[in-house]
Image (spheres, rainbow, N blue to C red):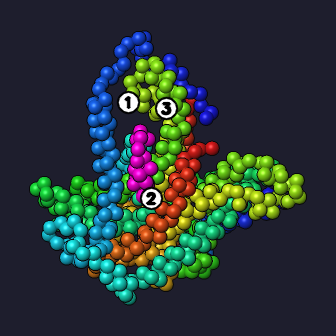
Amino acid sequence: MRRHPRRPGRLRHSRHPTNGPAPYPTSRAFHRLARGLRLVPLIALAGLFLLPFYLLVRNGLAAEADITGTDWTFFPDSPHWENLRELFDDSSVPMLHALGNSAVIAVLTTAGTLLLASLAGYGLARIEYPYANHVFYAFLVTLMIPSAVTFLPSFVLVSSLGWISTLRGLIIPTLFSAFAVFLFRQYFLGFPRELEDAARVDGLGHWRTFWRIVVPNTRPVFAAVGAIVFIGSWNSFLWPLVIGQDRDAWTVQVALATFTTAQTVNLHELFIAAAVSILPLLVVFLVLQRQIVAGAERSGIDD
Amino acid sequence: MWFWAFVGPFAAGLALFTYVPLVWSVWLSFFDAHNTVTPTEFVGLDNYTEILGDPSFTSSLTTFAVFSLFIVPATYALSLALALMVHRLRFAQAFFRSVFFLPTACSYVVAAIIWKLSVFNGVRYGLANTVLGWFGGSDIAWLSTTSPPWYWLVIVTVRLWLQAGFYMVILLAGLQRIPATLYEAAAVDGARPGWQVFRHITFPQLRATSVAVVLLLVVNAFQAFDEFYNLLSTAGGYPPYARPPLVYLYYAALGQGQNLGLGSAGAVILALIIAVVTVIQARWFGLGRRED
């Protein structure tokens, strides 16, 4: 918005463009063909992007021989749904327990992050404080510090608190996302002040204004940030690997990874496990797709 | 003070779980800290000289450099190409956007499973070797061949698949913010649709978005761990190649011996490198901005 549009005069162009013939005097059929041809790379790429999902389903519903056979089996003759029962009956992989852990961690992480980050974002956006900008920058700096630098020190802290292999250790240190605060602050800055002013006239303080007026009217941003945090939490790997060391504390990602490096792998069982692990996310995705895209779009706008 | 009632809980948590560990880690890096987080033996810069003299640490930095030289331009180019193609569509735009965005829902672990055990598993029934076989090629052991280093193909394509859709969405939003009047003016001036318009209108107008995307990509490349670990580690350990800094630190500090002092020194060195890279990027992009 702040940039000045480039003046068209800087383009190299012919002197009298409006006098000459149109650059492409083509028939309508040719046009249509050209447009159709332009779709070819797009469709090819879409196929490539969907290929891994196909492999996931094909392997997950196949018999082992379909996967390891010499000729490529495009799809098993009849889907082997019993692979699911085999997975959940297999006592060497705590899949059900791991799914439960992941669900608890993802839900609590999402709820906690939304609460902490929305409060902080609102305070930064709306409450007068002389050092508010300094505080905001102190938060933003942590976005530039990758986990390569922080995971070891955080591990040190969590282990000295005695939180290894506990839900506390897996959840609490991940609740403080400066990125979520950033998204909330940006959103609240664009939220019309009139509603809050009216609430003030009615005698509501900051606290009640936030809960009664602001939260009910800004649900989209909660959905967007919530979906992004949920997906990130469900898919995170390094932190659960380091902190959830005991088998009882494994998340679904850690269980899958352990499964992968086991001495003998049943491919069909591993792939049905992987397919099961992404199902919850696909549901979140389909329900909240618009909000997720909106959240992703916003993350590219530099302040 | 209402400000702190709202901001305080978050600020306290961030201080405790980000700032405190950072300071603690700097302190640890000057101590002999095997299996302990409260060491007593001060060793000065020994941890630093030891880690900088360790060829597997320095080669992990090279691995990171090679990796980001591949992945940052490749992801940016693919995301931009997807964004341009999807942006131009008159129908089914939402469908194609969803298809490219869908891998964002997958974890690196799941993607690594598909890549390692189904596409690039190195045996006959793997998809890549099956396709090679159709064209008369012979099997390639993708993940264990070091010359040529086929494992890079596996590592880079995993991340491309997982990330491209996310950055495509950011770039699409950027494309939609370019005012249509600019394109009209260009058409009036006789600019050829296609390369000329892209070169003089679209690309310069996307500049702020592109800078944000590249910065995010570089930070993400520094965090690379999941796909390396899941593609390459086996029950027997990790191979001596393709070991980025985070994988090195994981094994150095949390493997046998738990040498947290050494690991912390590595983290501090990484932090310094990241700071320098960030400053260079800011300068570089900043200079460009003054130019136009």
Is A69 on the left-hand or right-hand side of A167? Answer: left
User: Which residue is painted at 57% across and 78% down in the image?
Assistant: A167
Q: In which quarter of the image is residue A27?
A: top left
Query: Where does the image place residue A72, in percent across and percent down from the top left?
Result: 18, 66
Q: Which chain is disc 3 placed on?
A: B
Q: Residue furthest left?
A: B136
The residue labelled by disc 2 is B104
| Labels 3 and 1 in the same subunit | yes
In three-dimensional space, the C-alpha distance between marks 1 and 2, rounded to whole angstroms, equals: 30 Å
Kind of residue indicated by mark 2:
Thr
> Which residue is labeled 1 in the image?
B194
C-alpha separation, residue under disc 3 versus residue under disc 1: 14 Å
Indicate yes or no whether the magenta region holds residue B97: yes
Q: Do labels 3 and 2 share a chain?
A: yes
- Find the magenta span and give its range: B87-102
Based on the picture, tell me whether residue A146 belongs to the magenta stretch.
no
Above or below residue A174? Residue B236 is below
